[in-house]
Image: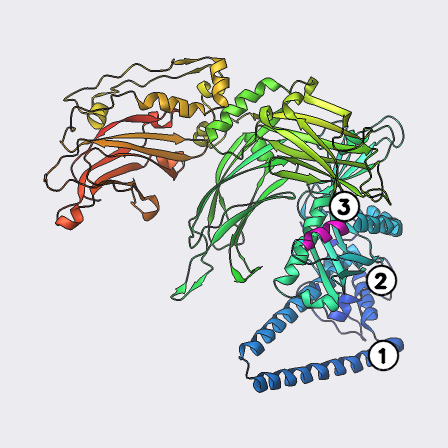
Amino acid sequence: MLFDNIPSVPLAEFIEPPNPTEDEPFVPLAEPRKMNDMPVAAAATPTPTNATTPISNGTPTQTAAATATTAVAPSSSSSSSSSENSIFSIANAAGKKVAIVVSIYMVGYMGWSVAWLIAPVILSLTRDYLARTSAKKRDIAKASALACEKDVILARIDELPAWVYFPDVERCEWLNKILKQVWPNANHFARTLVKETIEPNVALALSNYKMHGFRFDRIILGTIPPRIGGVKIYDKNVDRNEIIMDLDLFYASDCDINFYLGGMKGGIKDFQIHGWVRVVMKPLIRSMPLVGGLQIFFLNNPNVDFNLVGFIDFMDMPGISDLLRRIIVEQIGAVMVLPNKLPISLSEEVSAVALKMPEPEGILRIHVVEAKDLMKKDISMLGKGKSDPYAIINVGAQEFKTQIIDNNVNPKWDYWCEACIFTTIGHLIGFSLWDYDQTMPGVQNDDILGRASIDIASVIKKGVVDSWLTLEDAKHGLLHVRLQWYKLTADPNDLQQILLETQLLRVTTMSSAVLSVFIDSARHLKQARSSSKPDPYLVCSLNKQKQQTAMIMRDDSPVWEQGFTFLVSNPDNESLNIKIYDQKTGNDIGQYTYTLSTLLKQFNMEVIQQPFQLQKSGPESKLYMSLSMRILKPGEIDKESDAIEQVAALTRSSSVKTPDLTVVAPPAFKDSQAANKRQSTESPISEEELTVPTKISPAMSASTSSEKPISELAASVLTHRFPETSSTAGEHGLGRIQMSIRYSAQRQKLDVTLHKIVKIPLRDPSSIPDPYVKLYLLPGRTKESKRKTGVIKDNCNPVYDASFEYLISIAELRQTELEVTVCTQKGFLSGGSPIIGMLKIPLDDSEITTPAGLNTWFDLQPEMRHE
């Protein structure tokens, strides 16, 4: 049963009506009363009750009812205040009506378009509707936060605490009582955190939108403490040197926050936040307090809501208010959402490096392939249009966004990204699909097309996941994603293997290592201004990645104690660039460049708390930091997984995983059928000797890794297996075509290269053909699979060297044929058929999936009818 976990109050007392009395007639209760049905006054001003307080009949239900009645009963003091409020409301309503009349008069008097009147009315109605909806939600949430747990269950049985839904989540009313007692002190800490950390980041983010001068004027978080709906303690798969627990945090405050933005004063009321907070106690020590420190963070972005008040209330409208809300959510994520953590030191025995340096457990490589059968959200002139879909991937605070595919409900993105994973317990990767809609310049009103999520722990267990996900919050739609887990090692010998694999993938943004940086402090920085000390902050950059520390006011020896994580493509040729700036002047007051190849030679690839001499600074200026590098290594693949076919496609062959690579040239004839299909038997062509050794040494493979991928090397070897010229026009006398076909299982891409055509027959000496080639994938022959080369004028032996790509899974590949059609442009003008010859190539050939691929000549066949 749902309420079996409630030990203090029997379920019967929750739902059975009280015995009727003479003064109070019995009214049957069809269902528990919900908070949504309560009057706004009752929801906004609840009074905490005690479930065990005795009254006339002693039942808890009547206690809650009596308390609710008392909460809404008017008093003499409230009557006077309500009369004053009514006077102001009447004046406000009269002023609005006068403003409307004046607006209508001005529109007619000035001869303006009616759009000047309709647009503000629509905008105002929309704003009022959203304001009423959000205010109702906040009132309900505040009532839930103030009421006792039994009243919450009675009022909103559809939103029970986490300990009711999840059997491994326990009640923690004792913790709520402690929070209520310590909240005044925690309130002070929260104000300091908001002022020193959130304020400068929000001001910087708003300045990117040309909104300057943001600052908090007053921060009062109120008297309502956060409420914990349940606690979960992890006792399995946890390091013995740490304690991990999750808290279902719900905070509906009565805060009073004022801020200034560009000289305008605004405020934030009814701030709310709801999400799962993880508290990690580590390391455990042998002296009091037994725990060296705390790490507090949200696993994913929490739900945040608030109400804007004051003169800046005009921002609380669709589109514009979303900007401020998004910035505040991003800044909360930058402080307390993975990979960002709020560290708290509890013992001097634990160094700041051990507590605050990032420690990723691995890398998750994400491939968003495509989607199918998405909902149609756009409206066209002829009715229902399609959608302009894009996908957003969220891993904690890490967010990635695919490109937008216009007017397509079956988009193919082929998008790759990598996310650092700092915890694998209870962590999800979320996918959300959106339809891009820009209602006006700078304002988006995107529609949701569906959501899906995958547990990261399941990916780690399987090693590789290739799956179609059914979209939630959508009528229909599927999303095809591929995930691969990479663990981290401290062995530099693993670097060559991952570099080879990354090069075969042919995605330049993929990484081979992870760099963790801990910026401790700086000493004796030079003075940027003669009158005062600098306001320094530090910027770390690696390729296009950039991280920044907080700014320290007026200090030439700042202590930052902040950690960052960078993805490294190739440690052999990359460097970490560090610059220290003075915020007041913007001047550079110190630099340092660290070459990552030197870190590979260090013991365990680590440098702990070392001083580095700063450049362009004083002779005594030093930077203290710690560095740690780890190499990516593919996780173990579960051989018992259901997706054996996909797993096998994602694994590397032994020739790829080992530096000792053997290139095996395929035989000229596999069997008589293949011989008839690929090359003419009238004049067999002997293979030429390979121009490079078939056995590639480790040294050669290492040097090749920095120049070109092994697959390209093998392809270049096989390109010239056959003579440059052909002595025959093929079995049917229509010419022969040389092609290279290769399928990359890692990228799920089919590469087709059309090299050349020889011996095209000359039917009319006065009309030399203008040949071009068309490609289709069968069955289907859709426009999406159509590829076409350029036209070469007056040539019977054209050379194209044109490459085309198809995004296709290996399961589809084995059921697909490639149709090749050679046409002439002059055929359209002469009235005859433009087709010179055709060819159908089954793609289930195992040679296509090898690193070298299939590279051979094919005889063109007569025109075939389309099925």
Name the dominant secondary structure of the magenta segment. Answer: helix
Asked if the magenta segment contains residue 783, the reply would be no
Position of 260 with respect to 813 (left or right) is: right
The earlier-in-sequence mark between 1 and 3 is 1
Give the image location of residue 660, x and y in percent.
47, 14
C-alpha gap between disc 1 and disc 2 = 32 Å
Q: Nearer the viewer, mark 2 or mark 3?
A: 3
Asked if the magenta segment contains residue 204, the reply would be yes
The amino acid at mark 1 is Ser
The earlier-in-sequence mark between 2 and 3 is 2
Tag 1 secondary structure: helix
Which residue is at the front of the view, 593 or 47?
593
Mark 1 highlights which residue? Answer: 79
Q: Residue at x 17, y 49 (%)?
A: 828
Which image quarter is the C terminus in? top left
Vertical comparison of 817 with 630: above or below:
below
Q: Residue at x 78, y 56 (%)?
A: 215
C-alpha gap between disc 2 and disc 3 = 66 Å
The amino acid at mark 2 is Gly
Mark 3 residue crowding within 10 angstroms, few (<14) / some (14–19) / many (20+): some
Vertical comparison of 348 with 162: above or below:
above
The earlier-in-sequence mark between 1 and 2 is 2
Q: Nearer the viewer, mark 1 or mark 2?
A: 1
The segment highlighted magenta reads 198-207
Mark 2 highlights which residue? Answer: 58
The amino acid at mark 3 is Gln
The answer to whether residue 553 is visible is yes
Mark 3 highlights which residue? Answer: 583
Mark 2 residue crowding within 10 angstroms, few (<14) / some (14–19) / many (20+): few
Which residue is at the front of the view, 709 or 68?
709
C-alpha gap between disc 1 and disc 3 = 54 Å
